[in-house]
């Protein structure tokens, strides 16, 4: 996250001549990577994760054409207002996810205790319908969400636009 020089990786990427570079980095590292890739004339699509949601990439002047994916998360105005009132901070997409996670774990721990194996069993059999982030949250036998919806965005003229 605090990397200042990615020229070694940039050289390897350039010589591989990819069509796209996936960079699941935090903004600081992403900015360094994008700047150095552009300086090296690596003309490919850059694709990041949900850490690119904020305005850091835009403020750094490297956002044009950069794409990223982010979970499509419910974050109703009523919930945002409550978060702001309680914390003084705007509730971004992490707030409803964190809220639901705490509620889910509290529900499982209240029923099964704090034994790790029992918590895993509780998650695997969970069907949580009281969430603010998703209408229904449930996990498969591997512990993965059964339903996860992602959207892809591209920065154009300093703004993130949904890609259809």
Image (spheres, rainbow, N blue to C red):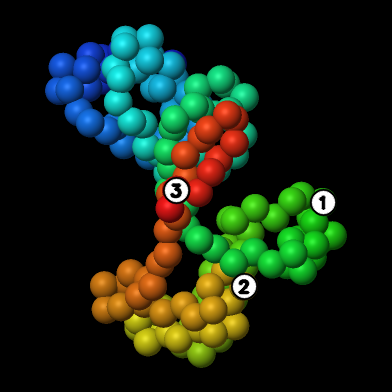
- Position in image of residue 3 (x %, y %): 42, 21
**What residue is drawn where x is 39% and y is 22%?**
33
The image quarter containing residue 25 is: top left
Mark whose residue sits in front, 2 or 3: 3
- The N terminus - image quarter: top left
Query: Within 10 Å of the Cα at label 2, are there few (<14), some (14-19), or many (20+) other Cα atoms?
Result: some
Query: Within 10 Å of the Cα at label 3, are there few (<14), some (14-19), or many (20+) other Cα atoms?
Result: few
Q: Which mark is residue 132?
A: 2
- Which residue is label 3 attached to? 163
What is the residue that sits farthest to the bottom in this orientation?
A: 111
**What residue is drawn where x is 45% and y is 86%?**
127
What is the residue that sits farthest to the left in this orientation?
A: 16
Mark whose residue sits in front, 3 or 1: 3
Q: Earlier in the sequence, mark 2 or mark 3?
A: 2
Mark whose residue sits in front, 1 or 2: 2
- Which residue is label 1 attached to? 88
């Amino acid at each position: 996250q605090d990397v200042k020089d990615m020229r070694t990786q940039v050289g390897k990427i350039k010589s591989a001549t990819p069509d796209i570079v996936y960079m699941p980095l935090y903004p600081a590292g992403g900015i360094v990577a994008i700047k150095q890739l552009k300086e090296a004339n690596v003309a490919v699509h850059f694709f990041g994760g949900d850490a690119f949601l904020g305005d850091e990439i835009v403020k750094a002047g490297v956002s044009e054409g950069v794409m990223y994916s982010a979970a499509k998360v419910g974050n109703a105005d009523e919930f945002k207002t409550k978060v702001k009132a309680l914390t003084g901070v705007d509730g971004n997409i992490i707030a409803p996810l964190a809220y639901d996670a705490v509620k889910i774990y509290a529900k499982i721990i209240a029923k099964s205790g704090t034994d790790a194996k029992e918590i895993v069993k509780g998650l695997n059999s969970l069907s949580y319908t009281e969430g603010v982030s998703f209408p229904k949250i449930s996990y498969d036998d591997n512990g993965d969400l059964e339903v996860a919806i992602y959207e892809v965005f591209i920065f154009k003229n300093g703004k993130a636009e949904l890609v259809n």
